[in-house]
Amino acid sequence: MAIQRTSVPDLQEMKRLGDKITLLTAYDCLLAGLIDEAQIDLILIGDSVGMVVLGYESTVPVTLEQMVHHTQAVVSTAHRPLIIADMPFGSFEPSDEEAIRSAQHLVKVGGAQAVKVEGGNDLVRRRIGAIVQAGVPVMSHLGLTPQTTTMLGGYRVQGREASAAQQILDHARSLQAEGIFSLLLECVPAEVARAVTAELHVPVIGIGAGAECDGQALVTQDLLGLYPALPRHARQFAQLRSTISEALAEFRSEVKAQRFPAEENTFHMKAQEAAKFSR
Ligand code: KIV
């Protein structure tokens, strides 16, 4: 039987039933395949690829073509989760036409089923409306929006004051009116996340937004203990960094001690051919 991919109505139903939605990031086919096997509902090809994989200091330099490249890798092995590709900084702001072109490129060439767009001001809201009208499902991203951390004063919790919390709620409402299928809320107080989740009829996925959202997101490298700095909102469910370091050190010492490759790792010629060859 063909595998059923998570759909937008499935997510809506999960919100209704209180069945918590899971979202993880992926940038390559290997981890995407494992995430698929673990029956995670949503995969995000986050522009965090810039920091986690490409070594940039922020997500700002990530290009649309890099997002397409990593989306293609993820799509090749992830058949069950709904696949959402991040729209990188600069790919949607200049005009509605450019926003539609970029979103459709991520869907047509990258293979994503949906896109994520950071921000909730009037300009971003118009772009999101245009993308939705053009037929591409959009997840919004409010709270800490890493593409604009210079304006936010760094990577800090957003919406601690009542007026800032109210602005997040207002933005969430107006984005929902533009037709988004879901909202990612990053690093906001639990009180804000609770109010937004109760107010919206579309699912709200939190990352650093407390336990009362409709679902939870994590950067997979944080969860696996691969990324050196762990943000407070994340939890390491494994410590793969030390496992990998030990394996690398062991490889080195086995080669130096001439214990690798062993006989079982070695190919041989047939005796007759070897004798002919040595003559
Ligand atoms: O780019 C990303 O990885 C994100 C996370 C907050 C999930 O947007």
Image: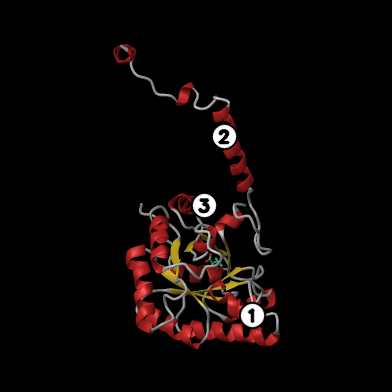
Image coordinates of residue 266 in percent, x first then y, are: 43, 24
Q: Residues within 10 Å of mark 2 (few under 14, many from 20)?
A: few
Mark 1–mark 2 Cα distance, whole angstroms, equals 54 Å
Q: Residues within 10 Å of mark 1 (few under 14, many from 20)?
A: some
Report the residue at 36% width, 68% height from top. Answer: 107
Q: Amino acid at mark 2?
A: Arg
Q: Of the residues under marks 1 and 3, which one precedes in the sequence? A: 3
Q: Are marks 1 and 3 in contact (CB under 8 Å)?
A: no
Nearer the observer, 152 or 10: 152
Q: Classify residue 236 by image quadrant.
A: bottom right
Camera-near label (3 vs 2) is 2
In this rendering, the count of numbered labels is: 3
SS for callout 3: loop
Vertical position of residue 244 compared to residue 9: above or below: above
Q: Which mark is residue 252?
A: 2
Q: Are marks 1 and 2 in contact (CB under 8 Å)?
A: no
Image coordinates of residue 3 in percent, x first then y, are: 39, 55
Q: Which mark is residue 262?
A: none
> Mark 1 highlights which residue?
195
